Image (cartoon, coloured by chain):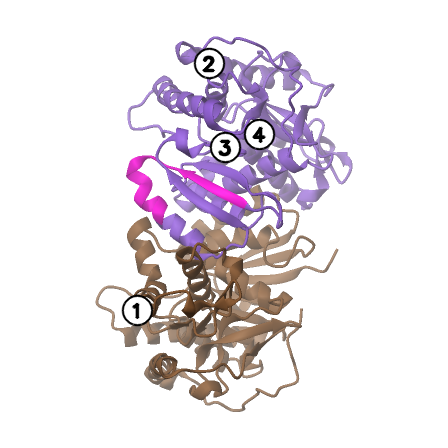
Chain colours: A purple, B brown
Amino acid sequence: MKQPLRIAVTGAAGAISYTILFKIAAGELLGKDQPVILQLLEIPPAMKALNGVVMELIDCAFPLVAGISTHDNPEDGFKDVDVAFLIGARPRGPGMERADLLKENAKIFSGQGKALNNFASRQVRVLVVGNPANTNALIAGRNAPDLDPRQFTAMTRLDHNRAVGILANHLSAAPTDVENVIIWGNHSPTQYPDLHKATVKDLPALAQVDRTWYENDYIPTVAKRGAAIIDARGASSAASAAQAAIDHMRDWMLGSGGKVVSMAVPSDGSYGIASGVIYSYPVVCADGDYRVLQGVPVSDFSRGKMAETNHELVDERGAIVDLLPAETEVKFNAVSHPTA
Amino acid sequence: MKQPLRIAVTGAAGAISYTILFKIAAGELLGKDQPVILQLLEIPPAMKALNGVVMELIDCAFPLVAGISTHDNPEDGFKDVDVAFLIGARPRGPGMERADLLKENAKIFSGQGKALNNFASRQVRVLVVGNPANTNALIAGRNAPDLDPRQFTAMTRLDHNRAVGILANHLSAAPTDVENVIIWGNHSPTQYPDLHKATVKDLPALAQVDRTWYENDYIPTVAKRGAAIIDARGASSAASAAQAAIDHMRDWMLGSGGKVVSMAVPSDGSYGIASGVIYSYPVVCADGDYRVLQGVPVSDFSRGKMAETNHELVDERGAIVDLLPAETEVKFNAVSHPTA
């Protein structure tokens, strides 16, 4: 049996965690031969509910779960972790401005970044799910100067999976028939689901759909899918978010099998995007690492969309710039590749 | 690629389904090479919420999902299904007596039994999760005279997994160290978690725990675990119930690998239990079938507990006897074994 890997999950008593924990514990993240130790973080008022979740994890008698611990602080919770799902975030309260939301979360994620910097495994992989995810990931990464910024990513895989699923459904195709869909930019309504490179059954996707449908129906449907699900279910899209988080981290660690997927990662300036912001790019994952796909043709339409979502991310960074430590070093050529 | 199997789930917009559907769709029930068609049933007021769940299933772009349909009636919903998870049930309302609860559910499950009888695959495997699960399974099976009663089972795997997990946790052992735990009887507080045959690390479990702890702490803790989780989480134990339902059905279809698990199945009178009631026994699953373990030694203590839960099941049957069709034929020696 392999040595257990340590998986931290924040917001562990929340709705997304209620799905993802039972998937990780069942081996859906790392396979049926990889034991895991779950390190669960919550804020103090949620510790009682978290204990209920732990009872249920025990009650499943999962063969792969080698340990479970609960923590109300990131210093203990992130001790030696190999993987961190940062799911908990401060939601927008009544009357709260977007700038306030960014700042409140900046405080949380700067603390988590520092704790990861000081206590996590040097190979830790971090996925931020809690919104505003991209800028939260930026803050966490910038507060972890001893780690490679590339170890901090944000989730646009939910948008990516939605873009694949909705396109497949529209064309009565299987999701596996769809390839090379790209989500560019921010996990927000400015995100850009790009079908210019996409194929369905090996033929160009845009040749199989109406251009008006693509621009006026598909793009806003993907971008606003979360609100549509809240309207239908009366609750947020927790299960599909959890599945997307599994997909993101599994591909990062075990490879995407040559497939293009979307991950929000620190921009190195590729495609004219502001350097340093956490921007969703097309990536291919292999050998425990991800590589931004270069040379994707960018139409004028795409360029406008990609710039708009870039602009939003630069604005978000501006709103919390006084909470960002100085950028001391660019490490994009660092030799340390986190590997499984 | 294999032919898709058709999986029906009732109560598909509810909390247990919100976990189980995303596990079935990800291949956790039948493996990563078995496509599935999901046939989702709900009552009309829940169809909007169910549509939200379907959106999320689409949004996961699951490679194994070959189709999804929604139904507000069992005749359409159970058409050609190979597997049926009967999760939806009428909960006990304010001022409702237990007899009323049994009768209200008897109506639902007699209709579902008839629809399975008339429209499902002849090899359909049925797992009743909705409470009172054992008697609901009895009603469904008795209303399906063209199917083998043995195709109708109820879930005590959650109790079984709880019994394993809580014992392992108490002894600081791994769940995989625990074998031959047995749940006898009803999925209710009268259930009997029997450790007389159980081993932990190949040594007798009861030699490793205090007898007083076993009788006065462990047995009621397992039996009342659901209430403890509601108290902690403020919500029912949906995720662990979903995992147990996956475990029950996967073992039934793919085998339990020689391991003893607990399933509530039609009693053939074994161990002095009333013939016909759906009673939880120790079983071993192989070749797509289950076999009740015979010859388990029964202590006086065990005999009393097994009789008490048997008595409750006979009482439950009595409360709805006028809604049960006459038993026309005992089919325990039927040659048709449902196989995968």
Q: CA distance from mark 4 to mark 1?
A: 64 Å
Q: CA distance from mark 4 to mark 2?
A: 25 Å
The numbered mark at residue A317 is: 2
- Dot 2: what SS? helix
The numbered mark at residue B212 is: 1
Mark 3 sits on what residue?
Answer: A80
Percent position of residue B156, x then y: 45, 68
Q: Is residue B15 visible?
A: no
View extreme (left): residue = B95
View extreme (right): residue = A202
Local crowd at mark 2 within 10 Å, few (<14), some, or many (≥20)?
Answer: many
Tell me where the magenta segment starts and ends, as one range.
Answer: A36-51
Q: Quadrant of residue A261?
A: top right
Q: In the displayed structure, would residue B192 be above or below residue A8?
A: below
Which three-letter amino acid code belongs to the residue tagged 3?
Answer: Asp
Q: Are marks 2 and 1 on the same chain?
A: no
Which three-letter amino acid code belongs to the residue tagged 2?
Answer: Arg
Q: Chain of mark 2?
A: A
Q: CA distance from mark 2 to mark 1?
A: 61 Å
Local crowd at mark 1 within 10 Å, few (<14), some, or many (≥20)?
Answer: few
Q: Are marks 1 and 3 in contact (CB under 8 Å)?
A: no
Of tags 4 and 2, the one toward the viewer is 2
Q: CA distance from mark 1 to mark 3?
A: 39 Å
